Amino acid sequence: MVSDIQLYIDQVRSGKIKVCKEQLLLCDFVEKAFDTENIRVDEAQLARYLNLQKYFPFSLLPWEKFCFALHNCTYKADGQLRWPFLFVLVGRGSGKNGFIAFEDFCLLTPINGVKNYHVDIFATSEDQARTSFDDVREVLEEHRQKLEKHFAWNMECITNKSTGSKLRFRTSGFKTKDGGRPGKVDFDEFHAYENWKMVDVATTGLGKKAFPRRTVITTDGDVRDGPLDQLKSQATQILQGDIEDNGMIPFICRLDSADEVNEKSNWTKSNPSLQYFPVLLQEMEVEYANYVLDPIGNSSFMTKRMNLPAVHKDAEVTSWDNIKATSQPLPDLDGCSCVAGIDYARTTDFVAAGLLFKKSGKYIWIPHTWVCAQCPDLVRIKAPLKEWEARGLLTFVDGVEVPPSVPAQWLEEQSKHYDITTLGMDTYRYTLLARALSDVGSDTEKGGKNNVRLIRKSTQMLYAPTINSAFANHDVVWGDNPLMRWYTNNACIATTKDGNMTYEKIEPKSRKTDGFMAFVAAMCISEDLTDCDEDVDFDFSVYSY
């Protein structure tokens, strides 16, 4: 290994800076590769690249040189790049855009050895996509006299005159016809990506040029179960030796646990640049003080500075691991008895309903969601609603609201397949729903005494221990349902002004919880459930709901 790689590994091994477990695993991973594989670092090429730092207002830090050397100058025996895919997860303020700018500048030059080696920078917004591009353009402007004979540039494209290689920025509006054959693609602030569509489009043309590369560089974010979470999972499995790396070098920096945030020396675990940036440390100290006062309102400190997304531990409904454990195969439930739950808090928003079964001691939940197409909160929601619609998990409803007949008719349709014995719902919208429920066979007389149970917030808290236990023991099953995972991760247990506990949203506008609240309503009447293993056949011509 060359000194720039070994230097960072030595820093980690010596304990000069605190690092997370992923960094320790990464050092093992890299050392093993150099010990067991026929790979080499082109030291002459690396030196020529690093000489270009003279044009930049900064020099690469040890961790950046480490990543740069592995990604750009380490080759297999057949001459191909050993790690053409660099995944960097670092805390906000680490200088990641500067790193991209330097790397991309280098690859445009003849040092790369490839003509027309175009580099495209992608992000979900134009401002973000332009950040690293503008960093390169500012370098060219600063050294115009020396560099204009080598480069041509404008506000949208930078071209190396000798190689013909171009640097451009892209957003979701990019189509393959616009570019076609990049040598490298960058994905900036990957946490904001809701699905893989932009990635798929961006990478379609890779492989048509020698030494294809991709760089993903990001902080963590609030989009759960999306591309970033999937990439983090893949990276962790690589570092643990569970799967082959497939050319990815995973550079992950984050706290190992939430309580580590209270010791400032741990902050380098998420930000390996922090020891070099005293002004950044001062700003983070201010943000930390605000976080301590209001952990939920200032959750971005943990999410983006510490790369550890989390709600307040005392407030979360259950852990993310428990939520993921709900992705168990759905059993055959045809003809089984069940109870129903519905959340109909706002007719102009999201409406959710579902069926709750018990089988072999597990709670099986089959839900559906309806979304008012005119809901004003849709612009704030980052979740891939259209993708979930395509999967049949939700339905968009035209008009100014979701009418009561919509969930009621869905329940009627389900009653043709299952024995729905009881419906649980919040008292708030019962009057609105009563007629529609009555139209499909529900007994709404006397406040729904027979087969409709009105659930109050106090009732929810009585069943909270049961719900918590079911999650903790992985006895909640709803299959591969990202919508339900999203709903549940958006919920918390909050204290009301009168000192009582209640289920609430972490954030009221963009974090919907309707499906989870429908589940809670059903769990509140779970004593009415008979285990499906004990069910007997019933006559579908007369259903109880």
Image (cartoon, rainbow, N blue to C red):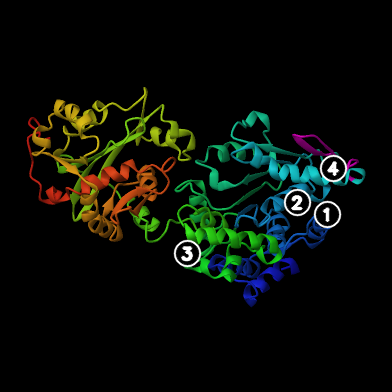
To which quarter of the image does residue 8 belong? bottom right
Whether residues under marks 4 and 2 lie with C-beta atoms below 8 angstroms apart, the answer is no
| 162 horizontally vs 506: left or right | right
**Disc on the earlier residue, 4 or 3:** 4
Residue type of the residue flagged with mark 3 = Ala
Considering the numbered disc 4 on the image, is that residue within a helix, a strand or a loop? helix
Q: Which mark is residue 141?
A: 4
Q: Residue at x 9, y 32 (%)?
A: 445
Residue type of the residue flagged with mark 1 = Leu
| 18 horizontally vs 387: left or right | right
Considering the numbered disc 1 on the image, is that residue within a helix, a strand or a loop? helix
| Residue 210 coordinates in the image, percent (x, y) | 71, 45
Q: Quickly name the residue at label 2.
A: 102
Residues shaded magenta: 147-160
**Disc 3 and disc 2: Cα gap in Å?**
33 Å
Q: Quickly name the residue at label 3.
A: 258
Q: Residue at x 28, y 50 (%)?
A: 477
**Disc 1 and disc 2: Cα gap in Å?**
8 Å
Considering the numbered disc 3 on the image, is that residue within a helix, a strand or a loop? helix
Residue 301 belongs to the span the image colors magenta:
no
| Residue 412 coordinates in the image, percent (x, y) | 18, 30
Q: Residue furthest front?
A: 498
**Disc 4 and disc 1: Cα gap in Å?**
15 Å
| Residue 456 coordinates in the image, percent (x, y) | 21, 46
The answer to whether residue 530 of the structure is visible from this angle is: no
Neighbor class of circle 1 (other Cα within 10 Å; few <14, some 14-19, many 20+) is some
| 284 horizontally vs 474: left or right | right
Residue 155 belongs to the span the image colors magenta:
yes
Residue type of the residue flagged with mark 4 = Glu
**Disc 4 and disc 3: Cα gap in Å?**
43 Å
